[in-house]
Image (cartoon, rainbow, N blue to C red):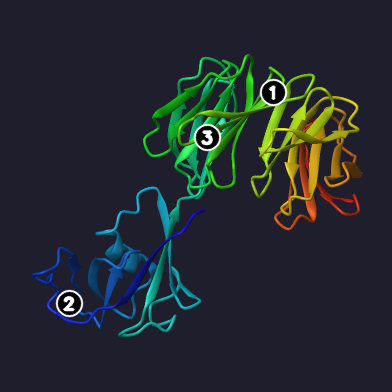
Amino acid sequence: LKPFWLQLNSNEGRTDGQAHPSSGRRRIGCPRAAMRVSVIGLCGDELAAFNAEPSWGLIEVMAAVGSVVDFAQHRARLFFGKAELTEDTTLADIGAAEGSQLTLVKSFALRIASASHDGIAKLWSATSGECLGTLAGHEGRVMGVALSPDGRLVATSSCDGTARVWSTATGECLRVLRCHDGVVFSAAFSPEGHELLTASGDCTARVHRTASFELVRTLKGHRSVVFSAVFSPDGQQVLSASFDRTAKLWDMATGSCVRTLEGHASQVYAASFAPDGRRAATAGADGTVRVWDLARGECERMLAGQSKAAFSAVFSPDGMQVLAASDGGTVGLWDAATGERLRQVE
Protein backbone atom coordinates (compact mmCIF):
# COMPACT_ATOMS: atom_id res chain seq x y z
CA LEU A 1 0.00 0.00 0.00
CA LYS A 2 1.33 3.40 -0.95
CA PRO A 3 0.83 5.74 2.04
CA PHE A 4 -0.16 9.35 1.60
CA TRP A 5 1.04 11.50 4.48
CA LEU A 6 -0.74 14.39 6.09
CA GLN A 7 0.20 16.14 9.30
CA LEU A 8 -1.83 17.53 12.13
CA ASN A 9 -0.14 20.25 14.12
CA SER A 10 -1.00 23.07 16.48
CA ASN A 11 -2.69 26.13 15.04
CA GLU A 12 -1.65 29.58 16.05
CA GLY A 13 -3.82 32.60 15.47
CA ARG A 14 -7.58 32.96 15.54
CA THR A 15 -9.52 31.28 18.34
CA ASP A 16 -13.08 32.04 17.27
CA GLY A 17 -13.44 29.01 15.00
CA GLN A 18 -13.68 31.17 11.85
CA ALA A 19 -11.59 30.97 8.73
CA HIS A 20 -8.92 33.58 8.26
CA PRO A 21 -10.05 36.17 5.67
CA SER A 22 -7.06 35.45 3.47
CA SER A 23 -7.51 31.68 3.54
CA GLY A 24 -9.98 29.34 1.87
CA ARG A 25 -9.60 26.71 4.56
CA ARG A 26 -12.48 25.57 6.71
CA ARG A 27 -12.49 25.52 10.50
CA ILE A 28 -14.46 23.26 12.78
CA GLY A 29 -15.27 24.55 16.22
CA CYS A 30 -15.78 22.86 19.58
CA PRO A 31 -17.08 24.99 22.42
CA ARG A 32 -15.12 23.13 25.10
CA ALA A 33 -11.86 22.88 23.13
CA ALA A 34 -8.65 22.74 25.09
CA MET A 35 -6.27 22.78 22.12
CA ARG A 36 -6.23 23.83 18.52
CA VAL A 37 -4.98 21.65 15.64
CA SER A 38 -4.84 22.03 11.87
CA VAL A 39 -4.60 19.60 8.96
CA ILE A 40 -1.70 20.22 6.61
CA GLY A 41 -1.31 18.49 3.24
CA LEU A 42 1.79 16.93 1.74
CA CYS A 43 2.71 20.18 0.00
CA GLY A 44 2.29 22.20 3.20
CA ASP A 45 -1.14 23.63 2.35
CA GLU A 46 -3.59 23.83 5.22
CA LEU A 47 -6.63 21.69 4.47
CA ALA A 48 -8.61 22.29 7.67
CA ALA A 49 -8.33 23.62 11.21
CA PHE A 50 -10.41 22.71 14.26
CA ASN A 51 -10.51 22.72 18.04
CA ALA A 52 -10.15 19.43 19.91
CA GLU A 53 -10.49 18.20 23.47
CA PRO A 54 -7.84 16.04 25.20
CA SER A 55 -10.55 13.42 25.81
CA TRP A 56 -11.16 12.93 22.10
CA GLY A 57 -10.38 9.49 20.71
CA LEU A 58 -9.94 8.28 17.14
CA ILE A 59 -13.63 8.50 16.24
CA GLU A 60 -14.00 12.14 17.31
CA VAL A 61 -10.78 13.29 15.68
CA MET A 62 -11.44 11.44 12.43
CA ALA A 63 -14.98 12.84 12.33
CA ALA A 64 -13.56 16.34 12.50
CA VAL A 65 -10.85 15.68 9.93
CA GLY A 66 -13.17 13.68 7.68
CA SER A 67 -15.64 16.53 7.36
CA VAL A 68 -13.14 18.42 5.19
CA VAL A 69 -10.72 15.73 3.96
CA ASP A 70 -11.98 13.08 1.54
CA PHE A 71 -11.40 9.55 2.83
CA ALA A 72 -13.38 7.76 0.12
CA GLN A 73 -11.75 4.39 -0.64
CA HIS A 74 -9.03 5.12 1.92
CA ARG A 75 -8.20 4.15 5.46
CA ALA A 76 -6.35 6.36 7.89
CA ARG A 77 -4.34 6.08 11.11
CA LEU A 78 -3.28 8.84 13.50
CA PHE A 79 0.03 8.95 15.38
CA PHE A 80 1.76 11.16 17.92
CA GLY A 81 5.37 10.12 17.62
CA LYS A 82 5.23 6.32 17.80
CA ALA A 83 1.98 6.29 19.79
CA GLU A 84 -1.16 5.60 17.79
CA LEU A 85 -4.54 7.14 18.51
CA THR A 86 -7.12 4.34 18.56
CA GLU A 87 -10.73 3.85 19.57
CA ASP A 88 -9.47 2.84 23.01
CA THR A 89 -7.14 5.79 23.62
CA THR A 90 -7.50 9.57 23.77
CA LEU A 91 -5.33 12.46 22.71
CA ALA A 92 -4.29 12.85 26.33
CA ASP A 93 -3.43 9.14 26.61
CA ILE A 94 -0.90 9.35 23.78
CA GLY A 95 0.64 12.53 25.18
CA ALA A 96 -0.85 15.05 22.78
CA ALA A 97 -1.39 18.56 24.16
CA GLU A 98 -1.55 22.17 23.01
CA GLY A 99 1.03 22.55 20.27
CA SER A 100 1.46 18.81 19.63
CA GLN A 101 1.92 17.47 16.12
CA LEU A 102 -0.03 14.42 15.04
CA THR A 103 0.58 12.50 11.82
CA LEU A 104 -2.23 11.17 9.66
CA VAL A 105 -1.35 8.20 7.46
CA LYS A 106 -3.82 7.94 4.59
CA SER A 107 -3.64 4.82 2.44
CA PHE A 108 -5.90 2.82 0.21
CA ALA A 109 -8.50 0.74 2.03
CA LEU A 110 -7.76 -2.97 2.25
CA ARG A 111 -9.69 -4.73 -0.48
CA ILE A 112 -9.98 -8.24 -1.87
CA ALA A 113 -10.69 -9.04 -5.51
CA SER A 114 -12.31 -12.33 -6.49
CA ALA A 115 -12.79 -14.12 -9.81
CA SER A 116 -15.63 -16.47 -10.68
CA HIS A 117 -16.77 -18.95 -13.32
CA ASP A 118 -19.99 -16.94 -13.60
CA GLY A 119 -18.08 -14.45 -15.75
CA ILE A 120 -17.77 -11.64 -13.22
CA ALA A 121 -15.24 -10.38 -10.71
CA LYS A 122 -16.03 -8.65 -7.43
CA LEU A 123 -14.30 -6.20 -5.09
CA TRP A 124 -14.76 -6.66 -1.34
CA SER A 125 -13.89 -4.75 1.80
CA ALA A 126 -11.32 -6.77 3.74
CA THR A 127 -12.54 -5.28 7.01
CA SER A 128 -16.33 -5.44 6.71
CA GLY A 129 -16.78 -8.17 4.09
CA GLU A 130 -19.06 -5.85 2.13
CA CYS A 131 -19.14 -6.18 -1.66
CA LEU A 132 -17.83 -2.87 -3.03
CA GLY A 133 -18.41 -3.50 -6.70
CA THR A 134 -19.13 -5.99 -9.46
CA LEU A 135 -17.00 -6.04 -12.62
CA ALA A 136 -19.09 -7.47 -15.45
CA GLY A 137 -18.19 -7.62 -19.14
CA HIS A 138 -16.31 -10.84 -19.83
CA GLU A 139 -18.02 -13.36 -22.11
CA GLY A 140 -16.56 -16.38 -20.37
CA ARG A 141 -15.29 -17.61 -17.03
CA VAL A 142 -13.03 -15.21 -15.14
CA MET A 143 -9.92 -17.27 -14.39
CA GLY A 144 -7.78 -14.74 -12.54
CA VAL A 145 -7.80 -11.33 -10.91
CA ALA A 146 -5.16 -8.95 -9.56
CA LEU A 147 -5.12 -5.56 -7.84
CA SER A 148 -2.48 -2.99 -8.77
CA PRO A 149 -0.04 -1.99 -5.98
CA ASP A 150 -1.66 1.43 -5.59
CA GLY A 151 -5.16 -0.07 -5.50
CA ARG A 152 -6.44 2.04 -8.39
CA LEU A 153 -6.67 -0.74 -10.98
CA VAL A 154 -7.83 -4.32 -11.10
CA ALA A 155 -6.97 -6.73 -13.91
CA THR A 156 -9.02 -9.79 -14.85
CA SER A 157 -8.23 -12.72 -17.16
CA SER A 158 -10.82 -14.86 -18.86
CA CYS A 159 -11.73 -17.86 -20.97
CA ASP A 160 -13.03 -15.39 -23.56
CA GLY A 161 -9.41 -14.83 -24.60
CA THR A 162 -9.11 -11.34 -23.13
CA ALA A 163 -7.67 -9.56 -20.15
CA ARG A 164 -9.46 -6.45 -18.89
CA VAL A 165 -8.28 -3.54 -16.79
CA TRP A 166 -10.82 -1.81 -14.54
CA SER A 167 -10.98 1.27 -12.33
CA THR A 168 -11.56 0.30 -8.71
CA ALA A 169 -13.09 3.72 -8.04
CA THR A 170 -15.80 3.57 -10.70
CA GLY A 171 -15.92 -0.07 -11.82
CA GLU A 172 -15.43 1.12 -15.40
CA CYS A 173 -13.57 -1.13 -17.84
CA LEU A 174 -10.63 0.97 -19.01
CA ARG A 175 -9.17 -1.40 -21.59
CA VAL A 176 -9.80 -4.80 -23.18
CA LEU A 177 -6.52 -6.56 -24.08
CA ARG A 178 -6.88 -8.98 -27.00
CA CYS A 179 -3.25 -10.02 -27.34
CA HIS A 180 -3.49 -13.80 -26.86
CA ASP A 181 -4.74 -16.58 -29.13
CA GLY A 182 -6.22 -18.63 -26.31
CA VAL A 183 -7.66 -18.56 -22.81
CA VAL A 184 -5.99 -15.96 -20.58
CA PHE A 185 -5.46 -17.82 -17.32
CA SER A 186 -3.80 -15.22 -15.11
CA ALA A 187 -2.90 -11.55 -14.76
CA ALA A 188 -0.36 -9.93 -12.43
CA PHE A 189 0.98 -6.40 -11.90
CA SER A 190 4.66 -5.59 -11.46
CA PRO A 191 5.75 -4.38 -7.99
CA GLU A 192 5.65 -0.74 -9.11
CA GLY A 193 2.44 -1.23 -11.08
CA HIS A 194 3.99 -0.08 -14.36
CA GLU A 195 3.55 -3.41 -16.15
CA LEU A 196 0.82 -6.03 -16.44
CA LEU A 197 1.72 -9.67 -17.05
CA THR A 198 -0.69 -12.15 -18.62
CA ALA A 199 -0.40 -15.94 -19.08
CA SER A 200 -2.30 -17.88 -21.71
CA GLY A 201 -3.24 -21.15 -23.32
CA ASP A 202 -1.32 -20.03 -26.42
CA CYS A 203 1.89 -21.09 -24.60
CA THR A 204 3.08 -17.54 -23.98
CA ALA A 205 3.20 -14.91 -21.26
CA ARG A 206 3.01 -11.27 -22.29
CA VAL A 207 3.99 -7.98 -20.67
CA HIS A 208 2.05 -4.74 -21.21
CA ARG A 209 2.68 -1.17 -20.02
CA THR A 210 -0.17 -0.04 -17.79
CA ALA A 211 0.14 3.61 -18.83
CA SER A 212 -0.52 2.91 -22.52
CA PHE A 213 -1.48 -0.82 -22.46
CA GLU A 214 1.17 -1.30 -25.13
CA LEU A 215 2.53 -4.83 -25.55
CA VAL A 216 6.25 -4.63 -24.74
CA ARG A 217 7.36 -8.24 -24.32
CA THR A 218 6.26 -11.74 -25.35
CA LEU A 219 7.83 -14.62 -23.43
CA LYS A 220 7.97 -17.69 -25.68
CA GLY A 221 9.49 -21.07 -24.86
CA HIS A 222 6.90 -23.25 -23.14
CA ARG A 223 5.56 -26.21 -25.10
CA SER A 224 2.08 -26.12 -23.57
CA VAL A 225 -0.40 -23.91 -21.70
CA VAL A 226 1.12 -21.21 -19.48
CA PHE A 227 -1.24 -21.35 -16.52
CA SER A 228 0.27 -18.57 -14.40
CA ALA A 229 3.06 -16.01 -14.38
CA VAL A 230 4.33 -13.57 -11.74
CA PHE A 231 6.94 -10.83 -11.38
CA SER A 232 9.92 -11.10 -9.04
CA PRO A 233 9.93 -8.78 -5.99
CA ASP A 234 12.28 -6.37 -7.80
CA GLY A 235 10.33 -6.58 -11.07
CA GLN A 236 13.41 -7.65 -13.03
CA GLN A 237 12.37 -11.25 -13.63
CA VAL A 238 9.26 -13.29 -14.39
CA LEU A 239 8.40 -16.81 -13.28
CA SER A 240 5.93 -18.84 -15.35
CA ALA A 241 4.22 -22.18 -14.69
CA SER A 242 3.17 -24.45 -17.51
CA PHE A 243 1.33 -27.65 -18.38
CA ASP A 244 4.59 -28.80 -20.06
CA ARG A 245 5.66 -29.85 -16.50
CA THR A 246 8.13 -26.99 -16.11
CA ALA A 247 8.44 -23.52 -14.67
CA LYS A 248 10.64 -20.98 -16.39
CA LEU A 249 12.58 -17.95 -15.13
CA TRP A 250 12.73 -15.04 -17.56
CA ASP A 251 14.84 -11.88 -17.77
CA MET A 252 12.54 -8.87 -18.18
CA ALA A 253 15.18 -6.74 -19.91
CA THR A 254 15.77 -9.19 -22.77
CA GLY A 255 12.74 -11.48 -22.64
CA SER A 256 15.04 -14.49 -22.64
CA CYS A 257 14.61 -17.63 -20.53
CA VAL A 258 17.47 -17.92 -18.04
CA ARG A 259 16.35 -21.05 -16.14
CA THR A 260 14.02 -23.98 -16.72
CA LEU A 261 12.86 -25.73 -13.55
CA GLU A 262 12.23 -29.41 -14.29
CA GLY A 263 11.11 -32.13 -11.89
CA HIS A 264 7.33 -32.20 -11.67
CA ALA A 265 5.71 -35.34 -13.05
CA SER A 266 2.69 -33.49 -14.39
CA GLN A 267 1.32 -30.00 -15.10
CA VAL A 268 2.67 -27.09 -13.06
CA TYR A 269 -0.19 -24.84 -11.99
CA ALA A 270 1.57 -22.11 -10.03
CA ALA A 271 4.96 -20.59 -9.29
CA SER A 272 5.93 -17.88 -6.84
CA PHE A 273 9.05 -16.07 -5.68
CA ALA A 274 10.40 -15.99 -2.14
CA PRO A 275 10.53 -12.44 -0.72
CA ASP A 276 14.28 -12.23 -1.41
CA GLY A 277 13.80 -13.34 -5.03
CA ARG A 278 16.40 -16.10 -4.70
CA ARG A 279 14.07 -19.06 -4.36
CA ALA A 280 10.81 -20.15 -5.94
CA ALA A 281 7.96 -22.46 -5.01
CA THR A 282 6.00 -24.42 -7.59
CA ALA A 283 2.75 -26.37 -7.24
CA GLY A 284 1.81 -29.21 -9.55
CA ALA A 285 -0.83 -31.73 -10.55
CA ASP A 286 1.49 -34.46 -9.25
CA GLY A 287 0.48 -33.44 -5.71
CA THR A 288 3.84 -31.94 -4.79
CA VAL A 289 5.13 -28.48 -3.95
CA ARG A 290 8.78 -27.87 -4.71
CA VAL A 291 11.23 -25.23 -3.46
CA TRP A 292 13.93 -24.20 -5.93
CA ASP A 293 17.28 -22.43 -5.80
CA LEU A 294 16.96 -20.06 -8.75
CA ALA A 295 20.69 -19.36 -9.08
CA ARG A 296 21.37 -23.03 -9.72
CA GLY A 297 17.99 -24.03 -11.09
CA GLU A 298 17.87 -26.96 -8.70
CA CYS A 299 15.10 -28.32 -6.49
CA GLU A 300 16.09 -27.82 -2.84
CA ARG A 301 13.10 -29.43 -1.26
CA MET A 302 10.03 -31.42 -2.27
CA LEU A 303 7.06 -30.79 -0.01
CA ALA A 304 4.93 -33.91 -0.32
CA GLY A 305 1.73 -34.80 1.47
CA GLN A 306 -0.98 -33.38 -0.75
CA SER A 307 -3.43 -36.13 -1.66
CA LYS A 308 -4.39 -34.43 -4.93
CA ALA A 309 -3.12 -31.74 -7.28
CA ALA A 310 -1.54 -28.71 -5.65
CA PHE A 311 -2.97 -25.57 -7.26
CA SER A 312 -1.04 -22.78 -5.52
CA ALA A 313 2.00 -22.21 -3.32
CA VAL A 314 3.28 -19.01 -1.71
CA PHE A 315 6.04 -18.08 0.73
CA SER A 316 5.41 -16.41 4.07
CA PRO A 317 6.60 -12.77 4.32
CA ASP A 318 9.84 -13.90 5.99
CA GLY A 319 10.42 -16.66 3.44
CA MET A 320 10.65 -19.32 6.14
CA GLN A 321 7.41 -21.16 5.36
CA VAL A 322 5.38 -22.22 2.34
CA LEU A 323 1.60 -22.33 2.21
CA ALA A 324 -0.10 -24.46 -0.45
CA ALA A 325 -3.68 -25.29 -1.44
CA SER A 326 -4.77 -28.51 -3.11
CA ASP A 327 -7.66 -29.90 -5.12
CA GLY A 328 -8.52 -32.11 -2.15
CA GLY A 329 -9.84 -29.12 -0.19
CA THR A 330 -6.80 -28.91 2.08
CA VAL A 331 -4.29 -26.17 2.86
CA GLY A 332 -0.85 -27.19 4.09
CA LEU A 333 1.92 -25.23 5.79
CA TRP A 334 5.54 -26.37 5.51
CA ASP A 335 8.93 -25.33 6.82
CA ALA A 336 10.70 -24.17 3.64
CA ALA A 337 14.17 -25.15 4.94
CA THR A 338 13.46 -28.63 6.33
CA GLY A 339 10.39 -29.68 4.36
CA GLU A 340 8.55 -30.54 7.57
CA ARG A 341 4.78 -30.17 7.35
CA LEU A 342 3.80 -27.91 10.21
CA ARG A 343 0.04 -27.85 9.78
CA GLN A 344 -2.79 -28.95 7.58
CA VAL A 345 -6.28 -27.49 7.44
CA GLU A 346 -9.15 -29.36 5.79
| 292 displayed left or right of 192 | right
**Secondary structure of the residue carrying numbered label 1:** strand
Residue sitting at x 88%, y 54%: 337
Which residue is identified by label 1? 204
- Please identify the quadrant where the C terminus is shown: top right
On the image, the x and y values in percent for residue 88 come to: 45, 71
Label 1 packing within 10 angstroms: few (<14), some (14-19), many (20+): many
Kindly indicate whether the residue at mark 3 contacts the one at mark 2 (C-beta within 8 angstroms): no
**Secondary structure of the residue carrying numbered label 3:** strand
Return the disc, 3 or 1, that comes first in the chain's sequence.
Answer: 1
Q: CA distance from mark 3 to mark 1?
A: 17 Å
Which residue is identified by label 3? 209
Q: CA distance from mark 2 to mark 3?
A: 54 Å
Name the quadrant containing residue 280: top right
On the image, the x and y values in percent for residue 238 come to: 70, 38
Kindly indicate whether the residue at mark 1 contacts the one at mark 3 (C-beta within 8 angstroms): no
Residue sitting at x 69%, y 33%: 255
Q: Foreground mark, 2 or 3?
A: 3
Would residue 247 be seen by someone viewing this image from the given angle?
Answer: yes
Give the amino acid type for the residue marked by disc 1 in the picture.
Thr
Give the amino acid type for the residue marked by disc 2 in the picture.
Pro
